[in-house]
Image: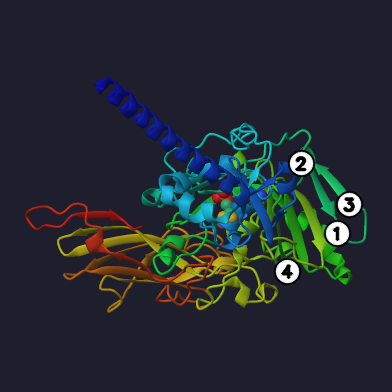
Amino acid sequence: MNKLKDIIFSNKTLFMSASALLVANLTYDHFEKKELNKYKLYTYDEVSKHNKENDAWVTYKNSVYDISKFIENHPGGKDKVMLALGKGIDNYWEVYKQHTNDPNIFKEILEPMKIGNIENYDENKYKNKNDPYTNDPQRDPELEYHSVSPCNAETPTNNIMDNWITPNNLWYIRNHHPVPDIDPKTFNLEIIYPDSDNINLSFDKIKKMPKSKITTTIQCGGNRRSELNEIDKTSGTPWKYGAISTAEWGGVKLCDLLSDLKHNYELDVKHIQFESYDGVKVSIPVEKALNPYGDVILAYEMNGEELPRDHGYPLRIIVPGYVGIRNLKWVNKIIISDKEAKGMWQKGLSYKSLPSYIKDVKEVDLNKIPTIQEMPVQSCIVDYEIKDNKIKLKGFAWSGGGRGIIRVDVSVDNGTSWHLANLGKGSEQQINKAWAWTFWDIEIDKKNIDTLCCKATDSSYNVQPKDAEHIWNIRGLNNNSWHKININNNLINKSITGDYILKAFAS
Ligand SMILES: Nc1nc2c(c(=O)[nH]1)N[C@H]1C(S)=C(S)[C@@H](COP(=O)(O)O)O[C@H]1N2
Ligand SMILES: [Mo]
């Protein structure tokens, strides 16, 4: 009897566990089917057709996502996502630590945009194969990196004033794409005229033309964006104040290269466009491009050395006093035109600063807003030291359009009282052709020190706005508000005797 009971019991157990398994299996099958039904299957070919801004699909592993509504808000900048449209984002996703550091980014941002799965999924298709960045040059580890593929790195902000001419290895780097690998022997610069045959020039031929040297500061349109992010999120690299550097460039003056044009104003030329190996297109007004005093040069030398690959080898256009992006690297085409360059870098939102009250680009007509060319007046506090009721400060100031710095005002009590800084290296530049920055310094006797501020005035008497709130813009461009440092947040060395020795770096 006991035996029978045992058998019945064990059979019952058997039956019960079998049914549990069945249920589990059913649920799994059901789930799988539901997943399969929920998502359509697409081929790689089909995905590749959705490669436009308003019809944008990408794949990650075996999933397909429609990211059309997201592109504009991509925190790393719209241009980066644009590179992957119709393709796999696998390479990019893993390279940028921002994606992988926070697991919620996948769940909350990417996953909700899923529209399907890949038919015939090939796990090796995008897996680090042909990583376009493997051929990028070696870089100085001292740079402050925001990303490596593409490379976005600022000049170490604490050393920015160690040299008035920034050494090549410490120059800030702002690349939108992989660095092109160009053979100077096959290099060809094409000049396209509206009314006559195109001209082709070899690198050798350009180097044999009369050489000019120009010293300029270049500043990225997004420099100091990180301070705007404290007010509200913007899109792009969160630069501190190190996306600015200075060099002496050697090359051919553009007005000499295009000298035949000076006599041809009936051509209705309004813009000189430049195109590059990495597909960037920009233009500058003809008044700047052909003005012999405008000092625009096609550079092949940087600080006496061959142009480094990161900075445009073999040929780069230098547009003194203009925003970083117009200083196009890896130039291979010059187009003389009555129109601005096409594309996002000139016509799109990328370098257009919208009013602070516009939070959505759809509210404006971008065609009516000019892109940034000459930059506004800027200054930053780079270092300070407090000792025995004395504070020493130093920094740099610069303005666009060659407008020299006529004054830098410094306050150590959050703008209540002001002091005139000494203008140092750079102040000797011709006042309306001051392409490079001016260093300044000051020593102030003061007991109660709180927030440090600086503001510069340029030769057109332009001044810097007090608050960043009023110039905040969705792209985070042209932040030239008073540079402020709250020393209490920057205290790194306070001795026990109460004798303050502070050395801190603005950030
Ligand atoms: N062809 C090309 N030119 C370019 C860029 C680029 O990505 N491609 N970046 C631009 C931007 S946004 C800036 S700020 C400067 C940076 O120059 P640098 O890397 O030599 O400092 O180059 C500009 N020229
Ligand atoms: Mo830039």
Is disc 2 placed on a helix, strand or loop? Answer: loop
First along the sequence among labels 4 and 3: 3
Q: How far apart, in angstroms, are the residues tagged by discs 1 and 4? A: 15 Å
- Disc 1: CA contacts within 10 A as few (<14), some (14-19) or many (>=20): few
Going from N to C along the chain, the mark reached first, 1 or 4, is 1
Q: Name the residue: 22% across, 52% down.
A: 492
CA gap between label 4 and label 2 equals 26 Å
Residue 419 image point, x, y percent = 31, 73
Q: Which residue is mark 2?
A: 208
- The local secondary structure at tag 3 comes to loop
Q: Which residue is mark 1?
A: 260
Q: Please tell me which of labels 3 and 1 falls first in the chain.
A: 3
Say if mark 1 contacts mark 4, CB within 8 Å: no
CB under 8 Å between discs 3 and 1: no
Q: Is residue 285 left or right of residue 20?
A: right
Label 1 is placed on what type of residue?
Answer: Asp
Residue density around tag 3, few if under 14, some if 14–19, many if 20 or more, within 10 Å: few
Q: Please report whichever mark, 4 or 2, sits nearer to the chain's N-terminal start.
A: 2
Outermost residue on the right side: it is: 196
Number of residues whose C-alpha sits closer than 10 Å to that of mark 4, classed few (under 14), some (14–19) or many (20 or more): few
Distance of label 4 from label 3 (alpha carbons): 22 Å
Circle 3 sits on which residue?
Answer: 198
Comparing labels 4 and 2, the label whose residue is closer to the camera: 4
Could you tell which of marks 1 and 2 lies nearer the N-terminus?
A: 2
Give the farthest residue toward the left: 497
Q: Would residue 149 be visible to someone looking at this image?
A: no
Find out if the beta carbon at label 1 lies less than 8 Å from the nearest ligand 1 atom: no
Q: Residue 369 at x, y = what percent? A: 65, 74
Q: Amino acid at mark 4?
A: Glu
**Quarter of the image that includes the C terminus:** bottom left
Q: Which residue is mark 4?
A: 287
Q: Give the amino acid at mark 2.
A: Lys
